[in-house]
């Protein structure tokens, strides 16, 4: 099974992105493009990053009626991204529709991952505002199970939740985990964090790492350190 380090390209514009990617002359990292960069630069930024030989996780977290998500996924497929995502809260019907839309001309498709509950949502908020009465943990696991049943490939979760997701959904169900920090680096605004080595032990398939690499004095060295710790 593929496992890898994904760098979160949390930059606001093309110039910064290209300047950053120019540093990687040997190994071309798997990268994540989120809403800020995609909305600022449009689809061409994805084509340009792909043309440089990077795999792309397009993190747009789609959540709409099934037909709209299906059509949007079909457009994203034409960009040849390697991974994309939806909110599991859109229901199994929406996730199945997303999968139907996600096909390339050669019959292959990008990996499709679900966001369960955003980590910015606390248990009390979820219960009081969204009227979900179960615990946050059970809700995350149940949404992961819905995603698996809808045919998705995995979920975004904390490395600390990876084992629980695997226990509920099977070892092959992918866990994509942000919240990774080196043992000796600052935590920024992340709260529940683990090191790359610990994420590997906990069963993460892909770790998403932003600032520890993008803000490092030597981003390539920080990336290689991450790869070494995570992939062994
Ligand atoms: O800089 P840092 O390593 O914290 O970046 C982590 C990346 O993962 C960011 O793009 C952030 O938006 C994303 N993310 C996260 N926590 C989640 C989901 C996504 O940190 N639960």
Image: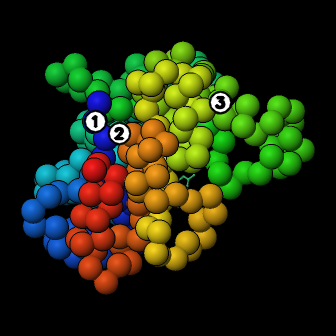
Residue at 57 percent of width and 31 percent of height:
165
Residue labelled with disc 2:
83
Q: Are marks 3 and 1 in contact (CB under 8 Å)?
A: no
What whole-number distance in Å separates the C-alpha atoms at marks 3 and 1? 23 Å
Cα gap from disc 1 to disc 2, whole angstroms: 12 Å
Say which element carries label 2: strand
**Horizontal side, residue 162 vs residue 72: left or right:** right
Where residue 15 appears, x then y in whole percent?
A: 26, 75
Contact between marks 3 and 2 (CB within 8 A): the answer is no
Q: Where is mark 3, residue-wise?
A: 141
Q: Which mark is residue 2?
A: 1
Q: Is residue 149 above or below residue 51?
A: above
Q: Is residue 35 visible?
A: no
For label 3, being within 8 Å of ligand 1 is answered no
Name of the residue lying farthest toward the right: 128
User: x%, y% of residue 73?
Assistant: 40, 33
Instruction: Mark 2: give few (<14), some (14-19) or many (20+) Cα within 10 Å.
Output: some
Sequence-wise first label, 3 or 1: 1
Circle 3 residues within 10 Å: few <14, some 14–19, many ≥20: many
């Amino acid at each position: 099974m593929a496992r890898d380090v994904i760098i979160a390209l949390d930059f606001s514009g093309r110039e910064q992105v290209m300047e950053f990617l120019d540093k990687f002359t040997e190994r071309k990292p798997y990268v994540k493009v989120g809403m800020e960069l995609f909305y600022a630069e449009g689809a061409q930024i994805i084509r340009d990053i792909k043309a440089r030989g990077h795999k792309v996780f397009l993190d747009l977290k789609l959540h709409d009626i099934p037909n709209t998500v299906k059509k949007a996924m079909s457009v994203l497929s034409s960009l040849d991204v390697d991974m994309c995502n939806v909110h599991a809260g859109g229901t199994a019907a929406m996730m199945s529709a997303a999968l139907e839309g996600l096909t390339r001309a050669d019959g292959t498709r990008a990996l499709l991952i679900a966001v369960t509950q955003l980590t910015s949502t606390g248990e009390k908020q979820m219960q009081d505002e969204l009227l979900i009465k179960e615990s946050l943990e059970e809700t995350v696991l149940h949404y992961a199970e819905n995603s698996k049943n809808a045919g998705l490939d995995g979920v975004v979760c904390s490395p600390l939740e990876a084992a629980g997701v695997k226990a509920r959904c099977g070892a092959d169900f992918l866990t994509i985990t942000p919240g990774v920090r080196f043992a000796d680096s600052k935590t920024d605004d992340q709260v529940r964090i683990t090191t790359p080595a610990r994420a590997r032990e906990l069963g993460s398939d892909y770790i998403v790492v932003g600032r520890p690499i993008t803000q490092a004095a030597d981003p390539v060295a920080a990336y290689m350190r991450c790869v070494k710790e995570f992939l062994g």
